[in-house]
Each structure stands twice: as C-alpha cells, then as structure tokens.
Amino acid sequence: MTRIQTFNMKRKFFIRHHNWEGEINEIDRPGPIKDFDWNVIFLGMDNGFRLVAFEAVKPAGYFLRHKNFRLVLSPDDGTEQFKMDHTFRETAPLVGDPNEGWHSYQAFQQALSDRFIGHIDLHLYIRARSEDLMEFGDPKRIGDGSWRLV
C-alpha cells in the first residue's frame, strides 16, 4: 500500500478517489482514509521506463484510468482500451529531484504520449506537457505533473 504525494502544494496533498474520480486532497479532510491508499502495480518495461497502474486498496480491483482526459476509478473490464487507459510510464519528474523520489506519469498510448498525470483545482487529468503543465514556465504549474510514492 502506498500514497501518492503531489509536488507543488505547500501542505502535503495526496491522490485519492472520491465519487469515482481522481482527486488530490489533504489526508486530514473528511472522508474514508482508505480513499488515499493505492497499490502500485508493475506491468513491465517500455523503452527503459517502468509501466505502472494504480489500483485502489478499497475498492480492490478498481484502477485509475483516463477517460476523456479525466482520471476516473474503474474496474478492469478486460478490454484493450482499459489496458491502454490505466497504464502509465514512470518517467523522470517534470520538476523535483528524482533522488528524493519524485516521478512523473506519462500516458502510455502513443497518441497521448505528450500527456502526464496532473491536477487542476484538485481534480486529476492527463494534461499536455507543452500546454497545461509548462504554462508560462511557471514552476508551480510544472509541479502539477510531479509525484512521490510514500
């Protein structure tokens, strides 16, 4: 079991699921604490990058996947589309020191390879690095796409 911390918030914010959607929040917020707990599933390697999926601890068997660029919690339906949508490349962080455990998670699909898991107003998306995450070279914005497993 692990928790996934975002890089760019002053306080410690972590990925959680709420109402079947991916969010970030502080752990001390109201709601089930298990919503912050994930199993990071190793799926193999791709050109030197680890491929991973994020499975909720509760409910087990549900994974973060992207659907219309939004990260949602879904059960594995066995389709090729699901496999593509729930698989992420673990890359060097867009910002942050990799020696401190920071990473970024890139969409696996070739057509979406410019997109990384990021957040806007506490909601999780796969966001284009060239547009959303690098807006005006703002380090805070770039940090939306960097995460640490704790």
Image (cartoon, rainbow, N blue to C red):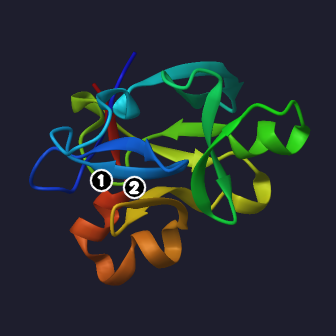
Q: How many marks?
A: 2
Q: From the viewer's side, name the closer residue of 52 and 71.
A: 71
Residue at image coords 25%, 29%: 99
Q: Which residue lies furthest to the left in this view?
A: 10
Residue at image coords 22%, 67%: 140
Residue at image coords 57%, 53%: 71
Q: Which quadrant is the C terminus positioned in?
A: top left
Q: Mark 2 points at which residue?
A: 145
Disc 2 is placed on an element classified as helix
- Could you tell which of marks 1 and 2 lies nearer the N-terminus? 1
Q: Which quadrant is the N terminus positioned in?
A: top left
Q: From the viewer's side, name the closer residue of 61 and 124.
A: 61
User: Marks 1 and 2: CB-CB under 8 Å?
Assistant: yes
Q: Residue 129's mark?
A: none
Inspect this view and state whether residue 49 appears: no
Disc 1 is placed on an element classified as loop
Q: Which residue lies furthest to the front in this view?
A: 31
Say if 115 sits above or below 47 in the image: below
Q: Which amino acid does label 2 sit on?
A: Gly
Q: Name the residue under label 1.
A: 95
Q: How far apart are marks 1 and 2 (CA)?
A: 8 Å
Few, some or many residues within 10 Å of mark 2 (<14, 14–19, 20+): many
